[in-house]
Image (cartoon, rainbow, N blue to C red):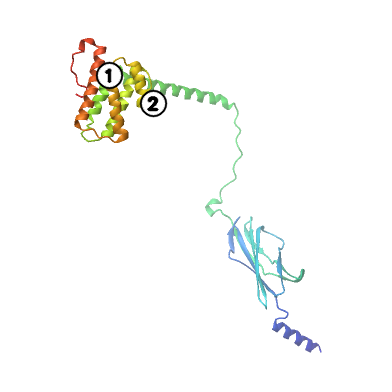
Amino acid sequence: MKTGLLFICLVLAGTGIFPESQVSLSTSDSMATIGDRITLKIIVKTGPDIEKVVLKSPEKNFESISTQQFPGRRTNEYSVFEIHEVISFFSIGNHTVGPFTVQMIGDNRIVEEKKTNSLDIKIKSVLEKSDRDIKDLKDLISLRGNPFYVLKYGIILLALALVVILVILFVRKKRRMSKSGPLQILSPLEELESAINKLYKKNWLKKRRLKEFFIALTDIIKNYLHREFGFNAEDLTTEETMWFVERNEPNPDIQNKLEFLFSQSDLVKFAKFQPDSSGLDAIKREIDSIIIEKRALVSPDNEDQDVSAGQ
């Protein structure tokens, strides 16, 4: 009868009714250095009725960092579970990892327990052979005295260096000023005439760069009005500028000529007006006339001088 029961058990085992659970432990790093992360892989193959597995670590000679369990793969005949355990060693030498105990859970109870195999892992030092003669750091040497005693001399030296630099810069500046001579400040009329001469030397009219010419001409005249009468003509419109001109310039003829120059400039800048050669000559005559009349007011003896501002 015992022989018959044994035969029946063997038949059932062969048909898979009582499957044999299998567990294995492996790693790709059999050698590492102190502090390296080593991943252990535990594979569990068990019966189809097992819902999950629980890993029990043995007495540890390593540091557990993390544990990750992947979802099981099930068939009608078996289930496969995979667990990754990340560990690290902090002492050199040969270490044995495992065996781990794996509990198979089914119907909220432990159906079976199995132990994994063991692994040998060698941990080496991060130091090379040439580095092993490094000795421990010596204790700090205590220094007596007040550090501010030395600091004040450093501040004095920095102050002296700053004074020397300032003296050198001052001397160089004086030399440049003496070479260039005293700065001559032009009168408003002289500055106007000089700026007009420079503008015509650019030959923008011959190159038909009319817009650039009249923008520069407007700026030159407004700068002159600013210096001559003291109002900020650069920030004013033509109408606002002429309002100030009528109240500051006593000569009606010059008022009319300034208004003509501003109107012609606005037509070119904003209405894309293209004056012909006769129109450009008229603008030149008006500019020269303003300069001659203003110079005559400054120096009455030169009233009859026929000096052209464009020469």
Residue 180 appears in the picture as rendered: no
| CB atoms of marks 2 and 1 within 8 Å | no
Residue 15 appears in the picture as rendered: yes
Image point (24%, 16%), residue name: 293
**CA distance separating discs 2 and 1:** 21 Å
- Residue located beneath label 1 in the image: 254
Q: Amino acid at mark 2?
A: Asp
Image point (24%, 13%), residue name: 296
Quarter holding the N terminus is bottom right
Question: Camera-side residue: 86 or 242?
Answer: 242
Q: Amino acid at mark 1?
A: Ile
Image point (77%, 86%), residue name: 6
Quarter holding the C terminus is top left
Give the side of residue 214 with respect to residue 19, left or right: left
- Residue located beneath label 2 in the image: 235
Q: Is residue 79 above or below residue 129?
A: below
Quadrant of the rendered structure where residue 286 is?
top left
Question: Camera-side residue: 220 or 132?
Answer: 220
Labelled disc at residue 44: none
**Sequence order check, earlier mark of 2 and 1:** 2
In percent of width and height, residue 21 lies at: 70, 75
